[in-house]
Image: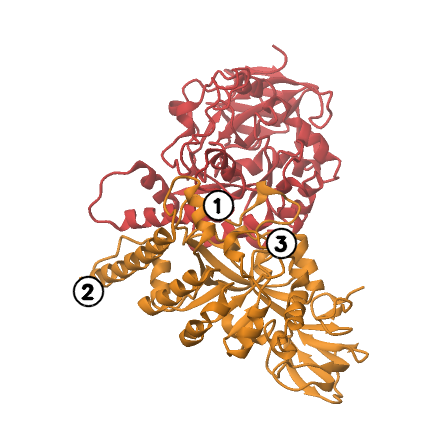
Chain colours: A orange, B red
Amino acid sequence: MKYLIKNVEIDPVVKEKITGDVLIDNGIIKKIDDNIVEKVDEVIDGKKALLLPGFIDAHSHIGLNPEGYGFEYDDTNESSEPNTADVRAVDGFTTSDKSIKEGARGGVLIYCVLPGSSNPIGGLGFIAKYSKSNLVSDFILRYDSCIKMATGENPKRCFSAKDKSPSTRMGIASIIRNYLFDGKNYIEKKKKSQKENKVFTEYDNKMEIAQKILERKLPVRIHCHRAEDILFAIRLKEEFGIRVSIEHCTDLIKVQDEVKKSNVPVMLGPVMSSRSKVELMDMTYLSYKTAIDREIPFSCISDHPVFPVETLRLQAGMAINYGADEREMLKSLTIYPARILGISEEYGSIEIGKKDNLCLWNGSPFDSRSKVVWNNIDGFIN
Amino acid sequence: MKLYKNAYLFKNDQFVKRDFLIDEGKFLKIGEVIEKNDNDEVIDLSGKYVYPGLMDAHTHVGIFQEKAGNFAGDDVNESTSSSTADCRAMDAINPFDPGVVEAKNNGVTTVCVLPGSGNVIGGEGVVFKTNVKNVYKERVKTPKRIIKLAFGWSPTIIPRMQKRKPLTRLAVSAILRENLEKAKNYIHKEEKDYDLSLENLSLLLKNEAIARIHVANLEDIETIVRIMKEYKIDYVLDHATALHTNTEFAKSLNVPVILGPLNVAGKAFQTWHLSFNSVKDLYDVGIDVSIMTDAPVIPLKLIRLQMFFIDRLKIKRSEILKMFTLNPAKVLGLQDRLGSVDEGKDADFILMDGDIFDYRSKVLKTYINGIHVGGEEI
């Protein structure tokens, strides 16, 4: 299908705004110009509204505990054992979760869905794209896109309550380290049997994943709030040469030098919630300004359902209230998470050659009174 | 040989008068008029209606006994581990379970009994006729062995109470993959100790067994299909209570579906959308639908209840009847032997005093392998 969005204020995110038209053919942006004349299947009159890329929520648990379903249908945490590297968030995703549609209402069309943070090694995440279908396969943008790990209070609380390891940060670190060392041994074993021309008969799903981590094919997303946990994550990256991003990063301001030096991306948030545990003591919207000032790659996350994905834009708005640059906060919902998640060739900005992931706003997304009036999946929204 | 004369058979939605000859437990000949040979015993069935014996490819009769107390006769889930591939339904079947006897008297001639859905890998199922005494010796051998799997939230219910894996659907998939991976390693190992669980799981990978998958909501159907395709396993979807919510997807799977039980309370979110209309939604896109009672969820003696409700959907009655006869036979790979009144097939049939779709009609006599084994009349 070929369609034309006419008469809109286009904010490409990576460039200056322009007023004009956008031509989309077969899901790809073909032309951006001040007046496009072309035979198309559908013309959308934008009435001078603001065209933005759909927002990307890089850290979410949407669909894993559909809202209103209650604890019986909670698939967020497989907290039966500390290492569940081989579980996949995609296997617990429920397309009928009400918050999916609400998220679209708040401009969020892409989310990276991760297992929860009860386990030191939680499982595989995937990237989903908003769809009206009831099939998970219509949501999947990237299957097995990353692996979730967690440090600090959450795994400590979960397992010490059962009198099991880990009950301390040391225990958490040792479980993660041992897993990666086991992965190294596994790779050696495989190589050996290959050398001896033997059929390898010790395939193991968890170890296959460890191999992918060590070969830098699978980025590790580490849940860290406190400074010591952030420093551990940076150390892990250096020790094993793996790809790491720091999730939440509540104490960023305190360890900003180390984070800056290590070049790890940080997924900041959620700040729009209460300080429900000790490690959130120093949680502040100022973290966003720090990331911007220090030029640390970052994104603004909802951690849905910690706070509802629909209001992700308002968290960014609050960061602006605390002195963060508005342009940068827009990027933290679009091009920055796209780059961190490795989907920036297709998503995250309005540029020729990218996919049509678009929302039409009747005002600034950081203003609570603004609304998405149209997106490329639902069409016009009442 | 026994010659039955003047029975009404239901062919292409019409009643036709037919004679049929039974020899060594099989329908030898069916015709408008069959002449009597000297040694033939003649039975006149004037005014009586003959249907194939009813079949249910998904039950727990015999292992989840009726009228046996809550604990004593309940052997349906070995819920001490999530993978009990070494368990066999056969070892727990009480052929004298009132559920089996009443099934026989109400026209059910063949059942498949599966382990329950408490475990991700439940164990092996078995097929037998309802006049069975020694299940092992008299069971109906299927071309492929039957392994029961359970997917989605069901296999998390008991572990959640026991506070062990799997607590989530995430781990249900992981457990299945983990065990299949072990079986794969087992197949390729040159030196190995015999392992019953892995032997049974290997059957799935070697295409010598079919996976019978308890699954409900659409997302879980997608996940299990992904895994079955990855490991190239033959499968059937059991329950599949939300499959009809995307018929295009359902059609693309090209697998038989055993739907039901339909007249039960939809407690879970997984059965939210299930109704009798679901049968028509799936039938209309060309899926081979069978209906289960999941007995004792619905006792087999009430098997015809669902038939009456499906009849209201205005599907051809001969097609509805197939959902209770030939289609379950196909699922089990027994369509050449069971499921219809046709020459060469086992003489498993029921004699009724009226139309099977009329709730007032009774099963007068049930015949298995040509022998009168029960009915409502006695």
Looking at the rendered structure, whether the residues under marks 3 and 1 are on a common chain is answered as no
Along the viewing direction, whichever of B264 and A223 lies nearer the viewer: A223
Mark 2 or mark 3: whose residue is earlier in sequence: 3
Distance from the alpha carbon under mark 3 to that under mark 1: 24 Å
Give the SS element for disc 2.
helix
Q: Quadrant of residue B298?
A: top right
| Circle 1 Cα neighbour tier, 10 Å, few/some/many (<14 / 14–19 / ≥20) | many
Distance from the alpha carbon under mark 2 to that under mark 1: 37 Å
Amino acid type indicated by mark 3:
Thr
Asked if residue A170 lies left or right of residue B254, the reply is: left
Q: Quadrant of the N terminus of chain A?
A: bottom right
The vertical placement of A31 against A250, above or below, is below
Give the SS element for disc 1.
strand
Along the viewing direction, whichever of B284 and B229 lies nearer the viewer: B229
Work out whether residue A186 can be spotted: yes
Which residue does the numbered mark 2 point to in the structure image? A195
Which residue does the numbered mark 3 point to in the structure image? A95
Chain bearing tag 2 is A
Q: Quadrant of residue A357?
A: bottom right
Q: Residue at x 64, y 79 (%)?
A: A327
The vertical placement of B270 against A131, above or below, is above
| Circle 3 Cα neighbour tier, 10 Å, few/some/many (<14 / 14–19 / ≥20) | many
Which residue does the numbered mark 1 point to in the structure image? B235
Amino acid type indicated by mark 2:
Lys
Q: Name the spot of residue B200 as percent of width and height, x first.
A: 35, 39
